[in-house]
Amino acid sequence: MNIMIDASQVRKNKKLTITASSNGIEKAEKALIRLGFNSKSNLAKSQLIGRSTVTKFFNLKPIQLDSFKRICDGLKLDWREIAGIAEANRSEPLTRNDGSNSELLEGVEQGQAPRRKVTVIDKQSKTIKAVIVLKGDIDSVENLKFIQSIVRNYSGDSINIIDIQPGSIQLIVEGSPEDIEQLISQIKSGELKELSGFPVQDIEILRETSEHDQNHEIDHKWRLVEEIVSHGAVGRNLRGVDLSDADLRCADLRCADLRCADLRGTDLKGVKLRGAKLKGAKLSGTNLIRANLIRGANLILDYLIGTDLIGVNLIAANLIHTNLIRGYLRGANLRGAKLSGTNLSGGYLSGANLSGANLRGANLSDGYLIRADLRGAKLSGAKLRGAKLSGAKLRDADLIRAYLSGADLRGADLIRADLRGADLRGADLRGAYLIRAYLIYTNLSDANLSGAVVKNARFGNNSGIDESLKRDLIQRGAIFEDLPGDRSKRLTPIKR
């Protein structure tokens, strides 16, 4: 079995993931029909796993190892066979250059994990199981079969690698008592110090009576999921728990303590989260459509500070006055979300979809919004000082009286954007598209408009535009209007 790793995924907080083999999916499809699930959605519902996770499984995409095992359990299948691990270890002698099986095992969660204890002796085959702990990251393992061939050379041909555990590289091996004893002797004597460049830290015989221990942590997770779905978790302490990939739709988690909880890939559609503490929670890829996240009147505002919301789906979510300072929302879907008054200063929203979102009075100062989609967003009075908005889509956005001093708007799409009364002092608008935009009463002191496309853009009563710049802008197609009278009347919404 070849190990193929996405090195960018191997870092802290990443989990061991595994991909099904093509033959394994054929078996899974047949089991789905045989067991009467009728659809993948029904399978997901029965196992309380998010539908997107089950879809990835059947589409040969990597998913977390515990979710993989749970899906296989639901289908009454051996997860090793579905992953192709069992076939690789049981069929043919392993050689260094054998690359016939290319299923994936990706990622490693850093740090020592508790060593799992599994059966010592299989009474039918008279084999013993042991765990070899290696030092290093699995992303640099090129060929697991090669490692197995090295182990066999030092011990005997009965040795097979049958599992990999997260943490430091922990290889679960089995073999005859004689070969396992020989392997232990070689490691303890120092003769076998490394495997394919990975230092050997330890080897340990696994005890017979505790095969259940291997899956205890996983079983506890899914029992907790079942409990939350059935009875809710109002006010419950769930700090740091692993609920990743679970289907918790419509669960009641009001006032629950979910700080530092792992909610990556979790389906939280329609979940009641009012007053929940989510500071430091991992929410990458989480579905929060219609989730109620509105804060209570007397609740602390920092529940979401530094929260990981990468790729999260927050369509139409209510996050009014929520504090998301330094939040990670790269690629998040916040289309139409209610975010007025929300503090997103210093947040990472590059590539996020905020089209049509209500961000009136929101604080996005120093935020990273490169290539973000803010088309039609309501940003009147929003603070965007020093924000990185290069390449952002702000077409038809309401930016009346917005604070954009020092903002990077290079190449931004500001077509028909309403910037009346906005503060653009020192803003970088090089190459920005301002076609038919409204910049009346806009402060443009020290703003850089080099190369900006200003055809039919409307200017008037602007600070920072001298006669020379005015003539240049008019030559490029800009329109300057004389707007005497009450300024406030000139800042009412424009009907387009």
Image: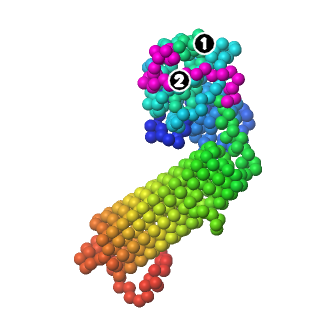
| Residue 429 shown left or right of residue 7 in the figure | left
Give the answer, above or below, for where 394 lies relative to 214: below
Q: How is the image coloured?
A: rainbow
Give the number of the disc on residue 342: none
Instruction: Measuring from the top left, give residue 464's x and y in whole percent.
Output: 31, 76
Give the number of the disc on residue 176: 1
Of the pair 58 and 410, the residue shown nearer to us: 410
Give, as a three-letter code, the residue at label 2.
Asp
Give the answer, above or below, for where 246 lies relative to 332: above
Q: Residue furthest right?
A: 231
Residue 38 in sight: no
Give, as a three-letter code, the residue at label 1.
Ser
Distance from the alpha carbon under mark 1 to that under mark 2: 19 Å
Secondary structure type for disc 1: loop
Of the pair 451 and 195, the residue shown nearer to us: 195
Q: Residues within 10 Å of mark 1 (few under 14, many from 20)?
A: many
Instruction: Measuring from the top left, give residue 161's x and y in whole percent.
Output: 56, 21
Name the N-terminal-most of marks 1 and 2: 1
- In the rendered structure, which segment of residues is drawn in magenta? 186-213
> Does the CB distance between marks 1 and 2 fall below 8 Å?
no
206 is within the stretch colored magenta:
yes
Give the number of the disc on residue 202: 2
Instruction: Measuring from the top left, give residue 295's x and y in whole percent.
Output: 62, 63
